Image: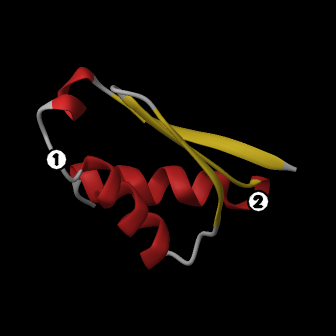
């Protein structure tokens, strides 16, 4: 009953704070993270399946405006 939500992009290497923006978006929306996985170009989180759509929308709004 979990979902994985990821942000991916080669630009993450040259733009510090991208992961922090993702975590901030989730925190502001009271979405709990169960696990975090990172690589050079990807940050993934596991969260409750019921929060998946809300999490994607919150992250999208944080990066691209509402």
> Residue 1, how many percent across, how many down?
88, 50
Q: Residue at x 50, y 75 (%)?
A: 29
* Disc 1 secondary structure class: loop
List the residue tagged with mark 2: 50
Label 1 Cα neighbours within 10 Å, binned few <14 / some 14-19 / many ≥20? few
Mark 1 vs mark 2: which is more N-terminal? 1
- Of residue 62 and residue 39, the one placed in the foreground of this image is 39
Vertical order, 20 against 1 (above or below): below
Q: Residue at x 43, y 60 (%)?
A: 58
> Residue 55, how many percent across, how many down?
54, 57
List the residue tagged with mark 1: 16
Left or right placement of residue 17 versus residue 26 in this view: left
* Disc 2 secondary structure class: helix
> Residue 56, how many percent across, how many down?
51, 49
Left or right placement of residue 44 versus residue 66 in this view: right
Q: Nearer the viewer, mark 1 or mark 2?
A: 1
- Label 1, label 2: how far apart the Cα atoms are: 30 Å
- Of residue 20 and residue 48, the one placed in the foreground of this image is 20
Quadrant location of the C terminus in the rendered image:
bottom left
> Looking at the image, which residue sits at the far right?
1
Label 2 Cα neighbours within 10 Å, binned few <14 / some 14-19 / many ≥20? few
Give the image quarter of residue 5: top right
> Residue 64, how many percent across, how many down?
23, 49
Vertical order, 20 against 43 (above or below): below
Vertical order, 49 against 31 (above or below): above
């Amino acid at each position: 009953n979990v979902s994985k939500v990821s942000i991916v992009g080669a630009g993450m290497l040259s733009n510090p704070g991208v992961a922090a923006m993702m975590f901030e978006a989730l925190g502001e929306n009271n979405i709990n993270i169960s696990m975090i996985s990172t690589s050079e170009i990807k940050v993934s989180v596991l969260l409750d399946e019921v929060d998946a759509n809300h999490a994607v929308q919150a992250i999208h709004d944080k990066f691209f405006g509402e």
